């Protein structure tokens, strides 16, 4: 065989071996938040992209149990997966991340948070989303009014939104945050948010005592909307905004009632981008950015019909 022929054969063998390894990759996706619509869309987007790569994907839901993510990470290491994707605060699962790092298994965040043991975190820009929705509230109230906030500081992407909202409201002297509520999120947050909003409305029965609800994601905003409607206080003009623009939120915005705005995250895009990152890592590329942002969009009555 000539030297040129040997080089061609060697290239074909190496390429085929690499392709087979890439196609046969085993990837674990681990989250305690699969009850959340946003997480469901992330995972679906990831799975569609993974199918194109021919990967074997195992989606693991710990059903709200963050601590259980650690043992599921350790299980994935034992199973010798090629990559792991997480949707959880990395600061709460350090032991599991360390196990993956020791085994040389790359871990990619999918709307999680940053950590030196992650390859990168693919997410929306929570600071920008919070700034846009909070500014919407301030502008709608002409800078004057009482606001209820729904937050969830235990999860970094959502905690970041609350930080920005706090700062903007604090920088508007005539805006008063009358309550900062952290709802139970076992069902996504709707039921407990409704219950807490109902109690708050009962404690503040006067018209105009509550002017707006700012929620760090859509489920609390929807729960607050249900409470306001059940209390027959829709006509008070209480402005509600959320973040995520999930289907229920879009329907509420279309109804042209109290729920006025939300931020559309490209959930499918976050999932597919996370898959792209995994593919790049499996191909040997070093990812330089600790965070990769996927674009977002403010959704209101004026453009909600274009989101379907």
Image (spheres, rainbow, N blue to C red):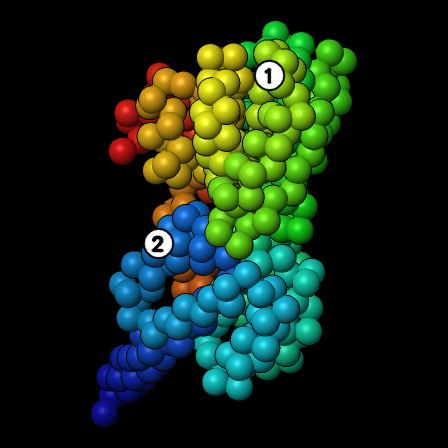
The residue lying at 58 percent from left, 20 percent from top is 212
Placement of 267 over or under 180, stated as above or below: below
Q: Position of residue 107 (x, y in %)?
A: 55, 67
Q: Is residue 300 left or right of residue 154?
A: left
* Cα separation between marks 2 and 1: 37 Å
State which tag comes first along the sequence, 2 or 1.
2
Q: Residue at x 38, y 24 (%)?
A: 253
Give the residue at the far top of this rendering: 142
Quick check: 306 left or right of 229? left
10 Å crowding of disc 1: few (<14), some (14-19), many (20+): many
Image vertical order of residue 163 relative to residue 20, above or below: above
SS at circle 2 = helix
Q: Which residue is mark 2?
A: 45
Q: Could you tell me which quadrant the C terminus lies in?
A: top left
| Rendered location of residue 251, percent (x, y) | 33, 30
Query: Where residue 104 is drawn, which disc sits there?
Result: none
Dot 2 and dot 1 residues touching (CB under 8 Å): no
Disc 1 designates what residue?
211
In depth, the one of 289 and 169 nearer the eye is 169
* Residue 52 percent across, percent down from the top left: 27, 63
Q: Badge 2, how many Cα within 10 Å: few under 14, some, many 20+? A: many
Q: Looking at this rendering, what residue extends furthest in the bottom direction? A: 1
Residue 185 appears in the figure: yes
- Where does residue 103 sit, x and y in percent of width and height? 59, 81
Residue displayed at 53% across by 17% down:
238
* Image quadrant in which you'd find residue 102: bottom right
């Amino acid at each position: 065989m000539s030297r040129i022929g040997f080089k061609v054969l060697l290239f074909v063998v190496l390429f085929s071996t690499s392709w087979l390894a890439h196609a046969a990759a085993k990837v674990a996706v681990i989250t305690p938040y699969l009850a959340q619509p946003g997480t469901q869309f992330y995972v679906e987007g990831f799975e569609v992209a993974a199918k194109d790569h021919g990967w074997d994907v195992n989606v693991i839901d710990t059903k709200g149990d963050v601590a259980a993510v650690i043992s599921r990470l350790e299980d994935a290491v034992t199973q010798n997966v090629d990559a792991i994707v997480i949707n959880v605060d990395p600061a709460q699962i350090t032991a599991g991340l360390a196990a993956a790092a020791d085994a040389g298994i790359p871990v990619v965040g999918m709307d999680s948070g940053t950590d030196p043991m992650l390859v990168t975190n693919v997410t929306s820009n929570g600071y920008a989303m919070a700034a846009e929705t909070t500014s919407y509230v301030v502008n709608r109230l002409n800078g004057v009014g009482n606001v209820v906030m729904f937050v969830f500081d235990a999860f970094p992407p959502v905690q970041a939104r609350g930080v920005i909202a706090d700062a903007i409201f604090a920088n508007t002297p005539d805006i008063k945050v009358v309550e900062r509520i952290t709802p139970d999120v076992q069902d996504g947050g709707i039921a407990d948010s409704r219950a807490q909003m109902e109690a708050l409305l009962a404690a503040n029965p006067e018209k105009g005592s509550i002017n707006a609800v700012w929620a760090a994601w859509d489920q609390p905003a929807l729960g607050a909307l249900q409470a306001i409607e059940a209390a027959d206080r829709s006509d008070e003009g209480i402005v509600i905004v959320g973040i995520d623009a999930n289907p229920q939120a879009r329907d509420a915005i279309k109804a042209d009632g109290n729920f006025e705005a939300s931020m559309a995250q490209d959930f499918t895009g976050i999932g597919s981008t996370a898959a792209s990152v995994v593919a790049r890592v499996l191909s040997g590329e070093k990812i330089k950015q600790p965070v990769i942002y996927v674009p977002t969009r403010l959704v209101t009555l004026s453009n909600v019909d274009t989101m379907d």
